[in-house]
Amino acid sequence: MRKVSLALGTMIATAVIAGAVLGTAQGATPKYGKCKPTGKFASMKLKTEKADTLTVGYVALAPLTYKGNTPGSVNDGSEYCLAANIAYRAGLSKIALKKVDFAQLVVGRLKGFDVAMDDIYIKPEREQKIDFSIPYGTSWSALVGRTDQPLTKEGLKDLKVAVTLGSVQQKWLDTVLHPSQSESTFDDPATMFTALRAKQVDAVLIDIPVALPAVATSDGAFKTYAQVKVGGEVGIVMPQGTPNRKAINAMVRQMQKNGTLKGLERKFYLPAYGGVDPASLPYWG
């Protein structure tokens, strides 16, 4: 009888310990790759497409913004860690990345995501179709060319320029610069720089946070010749009429106040620029 009691006691004790371990695991705050969110876990609420998941739209995977070879392998990057900060504050344990077409996104033709982030400029015409958060960053555009064919300000209008389809850069070419050659449009930055290397275009006009890292990793093939005051403030995109806008804005304000956004900029952007200070680039156009 004593042996039975001892055995039963041991089983109960083991079950209690196992329950405690399981409870700790279930109650532990989630991990989001290499990101280290700030703020308070589950301090705000979001209505999401999938339970316990923040579905994030992205335009292209890149080491600076979404670091990984596939959506499932992304574990770092400025935009991914911004998403991690949102998920953390909303008490969501998972982030699901969803590739979106930029041109379709900015005219409000896409659904199935909670937020979309990829240095997307806030523009009045876009605000008629989609909802933006308050700004979380600011950026202008850079003009990138090959080092074996130097660009000049005087020759700007005669260049064959590559831009992202539906971008503010394309609008600037069409309405302000009026180049002598029609621009070439692309769906993602990688193909634009491939076309530049293959001499299919003379230059690439794209956001500075995309341009400078591409130049830094080009083994001297590319150079950032100038910047153009095209662009502005970037915001988090949400489907029009979302119930999450107020909460997302509150999160952005909190990250501005506690230095989270500045920290992401210092960690990801400055080293990726290859030592080039955007303020040192001359202004053309």
Image (cartoon, rainbow, N blue to C red):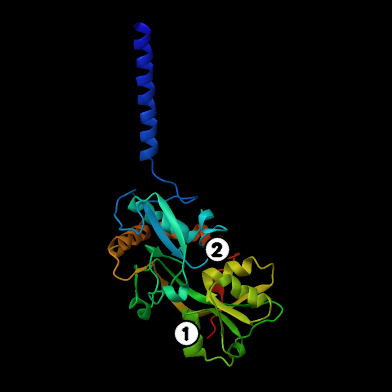
Which residue shows up at 56% across the image and 85% down it? 183
Q: Position of residue 169 (x, y in %)?
A: 50, 81
Quarter placement of the N terminus: top left
- The residue at which mark 2 appears reads as 62
- The residue at which mark 1 appears reads as 171
Q: Secondary structure at mark 1?
A: helix
Asked if residue 75 is positioned above or below residue 65 in the image, the reply reads above
Q: Residue furthest right?
A: 148
Q: Position of residue 3 (x, y in %)?
A: 38, 8
Q: Quadrant of residue 48?
A: bottom left
Q: Is any part of residue 62 visible from this angle?
A: yes
Q: Quadrant of residue 162?
A: bottom right
Task: Calculate the distance from the C-alpha at mark 2 to the C-alpha at mark 1.
Answer: 24 Å
Q: Amino acid at mark 2?
A: Ala
Among the two numbered marks 2 and 1 on one chain, the one whose residue lies closer to the N terminus = 2
Count of numbered circles on the image: 2
